[in-house]
Amino acid sequence: MPDSQKLEKAMLRELDAEFKNEINTDKNCTVQFNPETLKVGFANQVATPQGAGDQKGTPARQFVGAGTTKLSLQLWFDVTAEMPAGEKKEQDVRKLTAKVAYFITPKPEGTKFVPPAVRFSWGSFQFDGIMESMEESLEFFSSDGRPLRASVTINLTQQKITEFTFRATAGPGATASPGTRPLTPAPSKGSVQSIADSQGKGDDWQGIAAANNIENPRLLQPGQLLDLNASASVSISPQITPIAQIGSA
């Protein structure tokens, strides 16, 4: 019997104040059950100029600040379920949900308290932000009143709208599962050759274009996603001058 495929689990990790490096790795939280859905919302800050109510027609709205991105998801924890090998079996489910609550608890920073920066990652999906809210529902209790099962709804937010981040999901030398390879978005006026050059793969730009089924490697749509790890053999036929032209030369 073939080995069963390892299930990738979602994780919460703490980041430094610049949202760059992962810190306090002992606080990393691996979820017990992966969420069923991830809801991502985007919003721009717009406002109607003052005095617009005196003008005829629909007043124009102006962009007045940075946009925001929000992630909402629900996690489940259950101490009656079988735990992975090597993990301690808890008697109270709040021992597990406390690991999530860590990421919403403000920490002293100078003269004020600031919640930690947090990274949610699951396979190729990654979101960095601040935990804006957390709601815990205790669903099932033992006969002596211990909570055994809980659902936790969390909302993360970041004060900007950025390009999607795609995480690599396969280790060195491993074959990635379909739909999990990291993709690279094409910049404005980008070509397959220029993008491949920027990643040190300029010699294989034709194979990358063929593997991505790109008909015109010199004309890409801004944001078009490329798999730079893919490649296909490309045969280039030599240019043959017709005999009739040789005779007429």
Image (cartoon, rainbow, N blue to C red):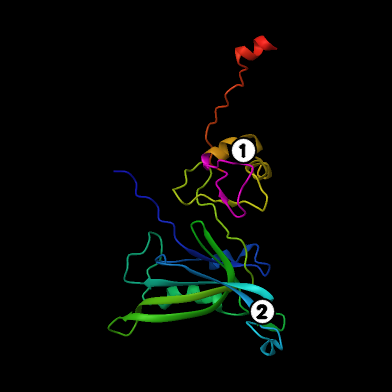
Residue at image x 54%, y 62%? Answer: 126
**Percent position (x, y) of residue 3?**
34, 46
Badge 2 crowding class, 10 Å Cα cut-off, few under 14, some 14 to 19, many 20 or more, is few
The C terminus sits in image quarter: top right
* Position of residue 169 measured from the top left corner of the image (x, y, whole percent): 50, 52
Q: Residue at x 42, y 67 (%)?
A: 37
- Give the prevailing secondary structure in the magenta stretch: loop
Q: Residues within 10 Å of mark 1 (few under 14, many from 20)?
A: many
User: Which one is in front in this view, the residue at disc 2 or the one at disc 1?
Assistant: 2
Decide: is 171 above or below 41: above
Q: Height in image: 214 above or below 17?
A: above
Circle nearer the N terminus (2, 1): 2
Q: Which mark is residue 60?
A: 2
Q: Disc 1 on helix, strand or loop?
A: helix
Q: Position of residue 167 (x, y in %)?
A: 55, 55
* 225 magenta-colored: yes
Which stretch appears magenta?
A: 211-228
